[in-house]
Amino acid sequence: MPTSSRVAAVLTGLTLALGTPALLAPAAHADIPACTQMAGQAGADAGTVTSACHRGVNGDLQGCVNGLTEAGVPAGAANGACRLAAHEPR
């Protein structure tokens, strides 16, 4: 086997060995309790807050923010709570 073929085979093996765990790693868990706690501190209804935070977990950040602001949470706190639900960096 030529040297270049061996190098290519070794690199392919390393790529598969090191890359596969990253692909199979679980995604970051959503944080509904942190979202509901943050929004609840603003005095919003717990049922509405939980429902809105679930939207944030499912990737609908705008729907989450809208739900929380309709429940009486200030926009800044709603945005922060929804980002906590989705575990997005600020």
Image (cartoon, grey):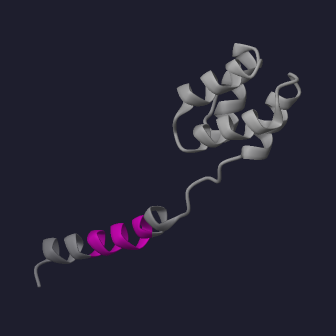
Q: Position of residue 34 (x, y in %)?
A: 79, 40
The correct choice, above or below, for 40 with respect to 66 in the image is below
Q: Residue at x 60, y 43 (%)?
A: 57
The correct choice, above or below, for 40 with respect to 14 in the image is above
Q: Nearer the viewer, residue 57 or 7?
A: 57
Q: Nearer the viewer, residue 8 or 30?
A: 30
Q: Position of residue 60 (x, y in %)?
A: 52, 35
Q: Position of residue 38 (x, y in %)?
A: 82, 31
Quadrant the C terminus occupies:
top right
**In this view of the protein, can residue 23 be seen by the observer?**
yes
Q: Is residue 65 magenta?
A: no
Q: Is residue 15 magenta?
A: yes
Q: Main secondary structure of the magenta part?
A: helix
Quadrant the N terminus occupies:
bottom left
The correct choice, above or below, for 56 with respect to 80 in the image is below
Q: Residue at x 75, y 14 (%)?
A: 74
**In this view of the protein, can residue 87 be seen by the observer?**
no
Q: Which residues are magenta?
A: 10-20
Q: Residue at x 56, y 62 (%)?
A: 26
Left or right relative to 10: residue 62: right
Residue extending furthest left? 2
Residue extending furthest bottom? 1
